[in-house]
Amino acid sequence: MSTCSLILLTYNEISGSRALFSSLPLDFFDEVLVVDGGSQDGTREFFQQQGIPVVGQERKGRGEAFRVGARNTRGDFLVFYSPDGNEDPADLPGLVRSLEQGADLAIASRFAPGARNEEDDQLLRPRAWVNLLFTLIANLLFNRGRFVTDTINGFRAIRRSAFERLRLDEMGFPIEYQMSIRAMKAGLKIVEIPTREGDRIGGASKAESFPVGIGHLKVLLRELLRPRTV
Ligand SMILES: Nc1nc2c(ncn2[C@@H]2O[C@H](COP(=O)(O)OP(=O)(O)OP(=O)(O)O)[C@@H](O)[C@H]2O)c(=O)[nH]1
Ligand SMILES: [Mg+2]
């Protein structure tokens, strides 16, 4: 039986953490850890009061947080969850099940049939369109398997063995895009489940669209220039 670690990624997410904590299916996991990027709004203290261990980061960035999470847990499966309101905790068991059924990487997709992304009720959807463009390019260039509809969402789970094999080195937000591309290049099995993206509950976004977009472009170019294998 595989063991499973839930890794919560936080950076000043007190409102979302408070609102979502009771909905997290903690019993489902062998281990829970918070990786905190330096919160000053009481997020760390909140989780510590709930008896959840919290580790900080020596180096900044959401990408680094993924590696800190992997280093400080032991499960065979790594499940990443960000408690800001975007990710529906009810989808956590589905991600684990996908790995149990043989996936190497399981992604909660905001663009699969039956899914929703936060801009769906808007006429103009700049964020979704840029996401879809990056996803289309990744599929065309690197994917030899089934089309992946959301290469960028951070709500995902991966086998520890796969995580280590991919040797991800991105420091910031494009970590998920790098993970998806390298998984495609390595021919890993990627499975998606549809998710309904919720709105941010409180606090401020840490992802500024323009620099994050440039970051994705850099990841894409770098992966294009690297040999196909990882
Ligand atoms: N540990 C850690 N977590 C981070 C860091 N940067 C962002 N996060 C968390 O990663 C999650 C996603 O960041 P967001 O700022 O919500 O990015 P986004 O979902 O693209 O933007 P929104 O539309 O505002 O939700 C949140 O839970 C953040 O608290 C970091 O440097 N370290
Ligand atoms: Mg968010």
Image (tube, helix red, strand yellow):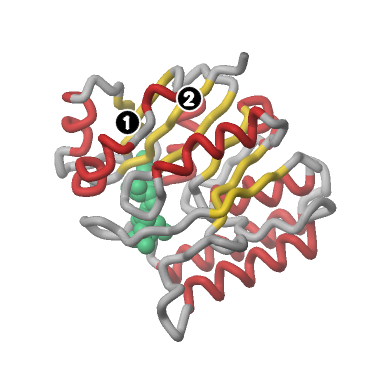
Asked whether 141 or 210 is in front, the reply is 141
Q: CA distance from mark 2 to mark 1?
A: 17 Å
Residue at the spot of label 2:
5
* Residue 125 percent location from the top left of the image: 47, 78
- At 61% from the left and 26% from the top, the residue drawn is 160
The amino acid on which the numbered mark 2 sits, given as a three-letter code, is Ser
Of circles 2 and 1, which is in front?
2
* Residue 79 percent location from the top left of the image: 50, 34
Residue at the spot of label 1:
56
211 vs 108, left or right, is left
72 vs 218, left or right, is left
Q: Residues within 10 Å of mark 2 (few under 14, many from 20)?
A: many
- At 47% from the left and 20% from the top, the residue drawn is 73
Q: Quarter-wise, where is residue 8 in the image?
A: top left
Q: Quarter-wise, where is residue 72 in the image?
A: top left
Q: Quadrant of the C terminus?
A: top right
Q: Is residue 178 above or below residue 73?
A: below
* Residue 30 percent location from the top left of the image: 45, 17
Sequence-wise first label, 2 or 1: 2
The amino acid on which the numbered mark 1 sits, given as a three-letter code, is Gly
Q: Is residue 84 above or below residue 213?
A: above
Q: Residues within 10 Å of mark 1 (few under 14, many from 20)?
A: some
Asked whether 101 or 105 is in front, the reply is 101
- At 16% from the left and 24% from the top, the residue drawn is 49
- At 17% from the left and 30% from the top, the residue drawn is 45
